[in-house]
Amino acid sequence: MKNYVKWLLGFTAFILLLLGAALAYTKLSLNYEKEKQSGAQETSQQVIDFTMLNADGETIAFSELLGKPVILNFWATWCGPCQSEMPHIQEAYEQYGGDINFVLVNLTDGKRDTIDGVKSFIEENGYTVPVYFDTEMKGAYSYGAYSIPLTYFMDAQGAVVSGRLGAMTREDLFNQIQVLLNQ
């Protein structure tokens, strides 16, 4: 009888633990979906400057790329959703590159993504959109890029107009560009 009571208490505790985990997962999932559907990130209205490397290996400050609207995108080659939105970003760059600064910041950790590896990826896919390398993760940390792809749409002074966590469809991207250009 004593073993039965211990087993019953253990089983009940296990079921309660599973229920608690399921409830927590459901709540977090709903919050994530709501944020994803709104397309908005919690954003700052002030420019957060950081340095990165350009394709020539020169250090450049993000603030140097202001002066016209900016699309700031954090990505990596190993990220499937990042890869899925790259053709749309390339198309948008070809169409709006004269009106908008496209700043694609690769999270270049030296392991999963290296500068040479990213350059090869860009070349193999025929992308011409400007790519920058965040080798010290200064931009990623400053802009909260803990999950990628992460994209911010900013006005010419660097104030965030909107943000998007997750891969963008072509329609999402082009709609955000129209909002950005109509500011």
Image (spheres, rainbow, N blue to C red):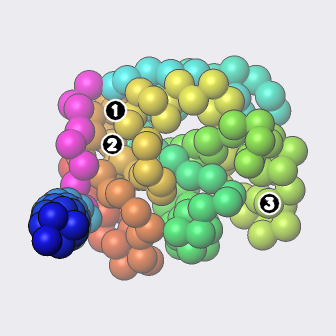
Residue 121 versus residue 41 in the image, above or below: below
Residue receiving disc 2: 154
- Residue at screen point 33% across, 57% down: 164
Residue 56 versus residue 64 in the image, above or below: below
Amino acid bearing label 1: Gly
Query: Splitting the image into 4 quarters, where does residue 114 fall?
Result: top right
Tag 3 secondary structure:
helix
Check residue 121 in the rendering and tell me which mark sits there, or answer none: 3
Check residue 78 in the rendering and tell me which mark sits there, or answer none: none
Magenta segment boundaries in residue numbering: 39-46
Real-space Cα separation, disc 2 to disc 1, in angstroms: 5 Å
97 to the left or right of 56:
left
Residue receiving disc 1: 158
Q: Main secondary structure of the magenta part?
A: loop
- Asked whether disc 1 touches disc 3, contact meaning CB atoms under 8 Å apart, the reply is no
- Label 1 or label 3, whichever lies nearer to me, is 3
* Mark with earlier residue (3, 2): 3
Residue 51 versus residue 39 in the image, above or below: above
Quadrant in which the N terminus is drawn: bottom left
113 to the left or right of 129:
right
User: Where is residue 61 drawn, in percent x and y?
Assistant: 56, 21
Viewer-nearest residue: 65 or 42 = 42
- Residue at screen point 15% across, 64% down: 2
